[in-house]
Amino acid sequence: MGAAGEIGERLRRLREEIDLHNYRYYVLDAPTIPDAEYDKLFRELQELEARHPSLVTPDSPTRRVGAKPLAEFAPVSHRTPMLSLNNAFEEAEALAFDRRVCEGLEISEAEYAVEPKFDGLAISLVYENGVLTQGATRGDGYTGEDVTANLRTVKAIPLRLAADRPPRLLEVRGEVVILKADFERLNRVQAARGEKEFANPRNAAAGSLRQLDSRITASRPLTFYAYGWGTAEGAPGLARHSQVMDFLAALRLPVCKERGVVRGVAGLLDYFHAIGAKRAALPYDIDGVVYKVNDLVQQERLGFVARAPRFALAHKFPAEEAATELLDIDVQVGRTGALTPVARLKPVSVGGVTVTNATLHNEDEIRRKDVRIGDAVIVRRAGDVIPEVVSVIRERRPPDAREFVMPARCPVCGSRVMRLPDEAVARCSGGLYCPAQRKQAILHFAGRRAMDVDGLGEKLVDQLVDNHLVSTAADLYRLDQPTLAGLERMAEKSAANVLQAIEASKKTTLARFIFALGIRNVGEATAKDLARHFGSLDALMAADQEALLQVPDVGPVVAQSIAQFFAEGHNREVIGQMRAAGVRWPEGAPARPAALSAVSGKTFVLTGTLPGLTREGAKERIEAAGGKVAGSVSRKTDFVVAGAEPGSKFAKARELGISILDEDGLLKLLGAPPPE
DNA sequence: GATCCTCGAGTTCT
DNA sequence: CTCGAGGATC
């Protein structure tokens, strides 16, 4: 072999090896060599190609870096049209789909290929004799845009298919997406550079793919999943869609791991619910699942209606984001006097529930998002629960949109509003003179984690305070049946229940009582620390700054808050009244000796819904066994206990490699003896 | 002084 | 759940 031939051979081997590592890294997510070694191979290839430009091939992994900006994208006609799917939002529509399929095919039960529906951008990739020659957006389904240069930078897309005799022509259909974790990283980078953050992974993927400068695309963490083929010439004859997917996977195209084959409508719905339950834990965003009749001959027999196939259906989850109108911004007063702006929205359905309010946190947040009253806004349920205004649709801003101004006086009591120079929140300076703060203080006192007075809710507290029946928490213990029964929506029976609950709350623990007082900066955890450290309320009340600083997790700020609270004569008086009324707890004995177990000293984080235990129950049992329950996952977390529909904590635990337990695992651990 | 971790506080809807 | 801020740690 001549020198040129040898170099050609070395180049070929290098490319093959790099392609394989790319596949393992980007598609299988299971690299087999360290990054540094990969970089070495890559550099060797780059150097060799630089010295022998004539031997550079278009499918070389070095050609992924991005090319010069284009003036515009060229139009591309798809050989086989990329049709849209019919959508279903209700189970009834899925049932109707299955019935039509069975009737159309004159069978009693159909077999379906099922897969998640990615929330990304549909694209088409053309491979000629195994080499990627063209990539295009879906466009209107018949004509898309040529984004070949951009798609070449996507590492999960093979530039050459892994086959000795690849099909003459293969159109691969799939979705370009950004993984959730990559999206968060990307936004952090954007923020650090002072550039605009993306609202969601889909927008980020769309924006990245539509860059005329492919070097920008190359810097974005795009990935790809194939979901089918269009025109295929010289490909093996296959009978089922599921086989097509296996074929694509064998060519080293990335395909979704969650795909499956099910029978009948029950199979479809089971899959829909299974994926729905897994949704939060999946690394990518999806907006539903797709059902396709698996048999390709049957698909052909069913054919198309208008522009959508009759053999496939997209069964969508309720939208997690929606556009609506911001009608007004109100201000709420919290227990500490914090003024929180709340968006009043035109009711809109998000994630299956109707949203009318959403917090805007504080003034800075409103400014940052540039939200104005009257704006069209995008609303999302953060972590699937709490509604939040994501962004403003600038193009739809009405000319009369008004900026929000934080009021100078408390909307409830008229006291001056203060904002400390280094704090984000504005506060009402009225203290307990402010009815809003008084009400919140009483609600906090009665809260489940504090004194646990069942049935004492917002409506009742409003009435009690407004009618001057109660002005401090101690007054609760002076209420009687006739007073309560005179209130709205308070029949004799409910009045008796509330009195009973108030009576029952008298028997409590020191930690709960300290928490219930609502001392600034003293929450549940600090209250427990204080109770354990001082053993009695009198010892705590007598403690000076220095004594307080001895308590773990108490620093100067918290110590100051506590000392200040007890120095206030009014507070001491209220506490005296409550003790006189019979509020009591076991005192003296500082903390029972925690049972020694495998759980002692370990930190747990709970996420999702456990089948047999409540969150509180699980927490109590872990603490009784000497463990700690923290709110968020970090490297110091020993175990994450995951139930059904876990949140982002589950993903984080996986990322950090923390042991994950289910309820059974937790119970076993609780019962297990301590490690030697 | 910077960084990481945890806690506190506020929030929605059924 | 998310944000901000207090505390601990290096």
Image (spheres, coloured by chain):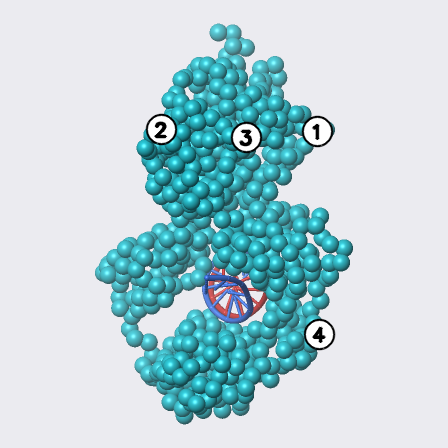
Chain colours: A cyan, B blue, C red
Q: The C terminus of chain A appears in which quarter of the rendering?
A: bottom left
Q: Nearer the viewer, mark 3 or mark 4?
A: 3
Q: Which residue is mark 3?
A: A307
Which disc number belongs to residue A106? 2
Which of the marked residues, 2 or 1, is nearer the chain's N terminus? 1
Q: Nearer the viewer, mark 2 or mark 1?
A: 2
Q: Are marks 2 and 1 in contact (CB under 8 Å)?
A: no
**Residue A418 appears in the figure:** yes
Q: Which residue is mark 1?
A: A72
In depth, the one of A33 and A575 nearer the eye is A575
Q: Amino acid at mark 4?
A: Ala
Which of the marked residues, 3 or 1, is nearer the chain's N terminus? 1
| SS under mark 4 | loop
Which disc number belongs to residue A210? none
Which of the marked residues, 3 or 4, is nearer the chain's N terminus? 3
Measure the alpha-carbon separation of dots 2 and 4: 73 Å
| SS under mark 1 | loop
Among all residues in the image, which is located at the extreme right?
A399
Q: Are marks 2 and 1 on the same chain?
A: yes
- Residue A617 location in percent, x, y? 33, 66
| SS under mark 3 | loop
Identified at 72% across, 62% down, the residue is A403
Measure the alpha-carbon separation of dots 2 and 1: 50 Å
- Residue A48 location in percent, x, y? 56, 20
